Every structure is written in structure tokens, then in C-alpha cells.
Image (cartoon, helix red, strand yellow):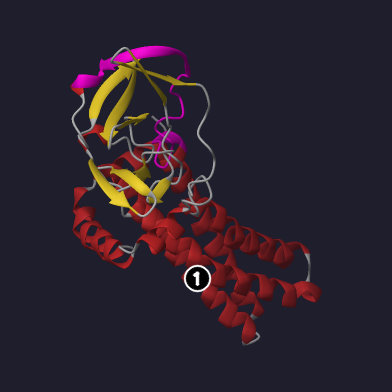
Amino acid sequence: MDVPQRLIDRISEFEEADRAAAPLAGAVHRVTRRDAVKNALSGSALGHQLHPVLTDLPIGAWTMASALDYFGGTRHADGARRLVALGVLSAAPAAAAGASDWSDSYGGDRRIGLVHGVMNLAATGVHACSWVARMRGRSKAGVALSTIGLALTAGAGYLGGHLSFARGVGVNRTAFEPAVTEWTRVAALHELEERKPLRVEAAAVPVVLVLVDGRVHALSATCIHAGGRLDDGMVIDEDSGPCLVCPLHGSTFRLADGGIERGPAAVPEPRWQVRIDSGEICVSRRTVPAARGF
């Protein structure tokens, strides 16, 4: 096993970090309890998480600032200073979106995410000091601080990439479900109870059926956000119609189309077509879900 992987394993197994992570995650949950705030920070209207979109700006600004520092000479010092400032200012919304995503993680993922966030916070602080040093004419100190800050940013980025690509954090949990193009019998109509989710399978794909006011709705039974069982969820009524709430993090999906009523989910839940044939419920899924959640 290589050194980076051993280090990440140690971080993920360091349970003492939970003493800080748990109350911090609780504080973030309180700040994001309003639907509008959670949806905005989760990227529910984008079709995927907002955080990776926002991180490009501070990373790009700080990288270009260092490039000007080392290759642009003194004539580009003002441009480098402005780029450092841009990175510091744009880091705030990126951190807010990242904190919202992180607060819904657990165990080793949460511990790695905590270190990722702390390193990004440190990088932002170091770059802020670089900005101040440059404003005061201490260009050499400013360049040195930016270099340190960029190294911290790279380390934090490595951990963020590991969370996404090695541990699957933020990955759509239904992305690899196969299409079921043929009508497939999954249950008898009399098996359904009003507003009580029923888990069935169509060609080995878990599907949840919900009967509301005489209409049968069908969604994939695995929550796209973190794999929660939607058949264990609760049916609620919203202005947009009946919705199904994931019991894991509270992601709320419209039964009519799988669209997102509330995050942290950032991708609509796959909706299945339903047909009633001689008292038998048949489902199929011919299309991929729409990109937008609203």
C-alpha cells in the first residue's frame, strides 16, 4: 500500500475526530434546515453538486496568481495580488456548499472530509495573509505565503478527489441501474396500501411503489444521494403534490416525476412508468432521469 493511501486510512479510522465533527455537522444542519438554503447549497437545481463547480474559481485564481509570481515578473505583481484576493473572496461560497455536503456524511467519509475542509480553510487563511502582505508592499512574503497556500489547496484537493472517486461520496447511487424496457410484473394491485411504500424488484432493480388517491407511482427504491431505502421513507404532501422522503438525510422527491423537492439530493430520483394489467402492476424504465431537479 502506498503512502497516500496509508495516510488516508489513518484519517478515516481516527475516531477522535468525531468529537469535533459531530457538533460541527449539527451546527451546519441547523444553518441549512430551510429548504431553500439546503437546495441552493446542494445544487439541486443543477443536476449535480454545487461544491465542485464553485471550487474551480479559488483554485484557478490562486494557481494563476502563483504562475504570475514565478513567470510574470514584477510587472504582473498587481494582477497576482488581485487574483489572490479573488480566490479568497470566492472561497467562501465554495466552503459553504462543501460544508453542506459534508454534514450529511458519516464515519470515515466525515473524518476525511473534516481534514479536507480544515486544509482548505488553512489555505484560504494563508492566501488572505498573502493578500495583506502584498497590499503592504511585502511582495516576497506574499509570494511565499501563496506558495504555501497553494500546496495546502493541492493537498485538500487530493482528499476531495479521493472522497468522490475512491469512496463514491456524492455519486448518484442509481447511475448504473440498467434500463428495463420491457413491461415487468412486480406486484398485484391489492398488495398496495394507501400511502404505504412497497419495495419490489424489476429485473433485479429495486423499485418502490406508492399508492396515492388511486394512482400508483413508481420510483427507484435506492436514494440517489447516499443509497437510503426509499421504501422505508414517509409519504408527505407538498404544494407540488405527494412526495417521498428518504429516511437517511431527508431528500424529498415528487412521486409524479421524481423531481427534487428538497436536498441534499442533487439529481432527480429515476421514475418508472406504471401500467395496471388485470389487477397486476407492471413497470418499465425506458428513459434516463432529467438533469434538472425542479
Looking at the rendering, which quadrant does residue 76 occupy?
bottom right
- Residue that sits furthest to the right in the current view: 75
Quadrant, the N terminus: top left
**Number of marks in picture:** 1
Range drawn in magenta: 165-190
Label 1: which secondary element: helix
Amino acid type of the residue that numbered disc 1 sits on in the rendered structure: Val
| In the rendered image, the vertical position of residue 244 relative to residue 88, given as above or below | above
Query: Viewer-proximal residue, 156 or 165?
Result: 165
At 23% from the left and 27% from the top, the residue drawn is 198
Q: Examine the rendered structure and indicate whether residue 21 appears above or below residue 189.
A: below
- What's the residue at 41%, 47% (across, down)? 260
Q: 185 or 145, which lies in front?
A: 185
Q: Residues within 10 Å of mark 1 (few under 14, many from 20)?
A: many
Q: Is residue 19 magenta?
A: no
Residue 227 horizontal/vertical position (percent):
32, 35
Q: Nearer the viewer, residue 100 or 84?
A: 100
- Decide: is 81 above or below 106: below
Image coordinates for residue 65, horizontal then vertical, percent: 67, 66
Q: Is residue 183 magenta?
A: yes
Residue 255 is left or right of residue 87, and the answer is: left
Can residue 229 be seen from the camera position used here?
A: no
Where in the figure is residue 195, as x and y percent of width and height? 22, 37
Q: Which residue is mark 1?
A: 126
- Any part of residue 125 in sight: yes
Name the residue located 59 percent from the left edge and 78 percent from the top edge.
Answer: 131
Q: Position of residue 54 (x, y in %)?
A: 55, 58
